Amino acid sequence: MTVDARLESLRSRHAKLEEELHQELNRPHGDDNHVAELKREKLRLKDEIERLGYQVDA
C-alpha cells in the first residue's frame, strides 16, 4: 500500500470515528467509556496521519 493510499484509509477511518463519537455524545445516556475509547482511537489515527504526512512532505 502506498503512503497516499494509507493516508486516505486513515482519514476515512478518522471521519467514521468522528461520526460515531458525535452519535454517542448525542445519545441521552451515552457510554462514557466508549466515548473515551473513540477519542483515544481518533487521536492515535491523527498522530499516524501527521507522521505519514511528514514522510510524504520530506
Image (cartoon, rainbow, N blue to C red):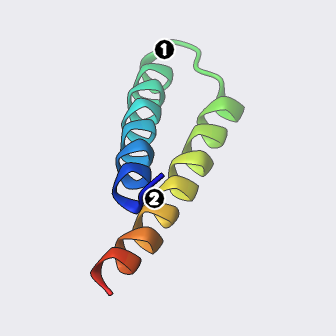
32 shown above or below 48: above
Judge by depth and name the residue closer to the eye, 39 or 9: 9
Splitting the image into 4 quarters, where does residue 37 fall? top right
Judge by depth and name the residue closer to the eye, 47 or 3: 3
Q: Residue at x 40, y 79 (%)?
A: 55
**Residue 43, position in %: x, y?**
52, 56
Contact flag, marks 2 and 1 (Cβ < 8 Å): no
Please state which of the two labelled residues, at mark 2 or mark 1, is closer to the viewer: 2
Image quarter of the C terminus: bottom left
Q: What kind of element bears circle 1? A: loop
Q: Which mark is residue 27?
A: 1
Splitting the image into 4 quarters, where does residue 23 fall? top left
Q: Residue at x 71, y 34 (%)?
A: 33
Most extreme residue toward the right is 33
Q: Residue at x 58, y 20 (%)?
A: 30
- Earlier residue among tags 2 and 1: 1
The residue labelled by disc 2 is 46
Find the distance from the CA under tag 2 to the CA under tag 1: 25 Å
36 shown above or below 55: above
- Residue type at the position of mark 1: Arg
Most extreme residue toward the front is 1
Q: Residue at x 33, y 75 (%)?
A: 56
Judge by depth and name the residue closer to the eye, 12 or 21: 12
Q: Does 22 sit left or right of 37 as displayed?
A: left
- Residue type at the position of mark 2: Lys
49 shown above or below 54: above
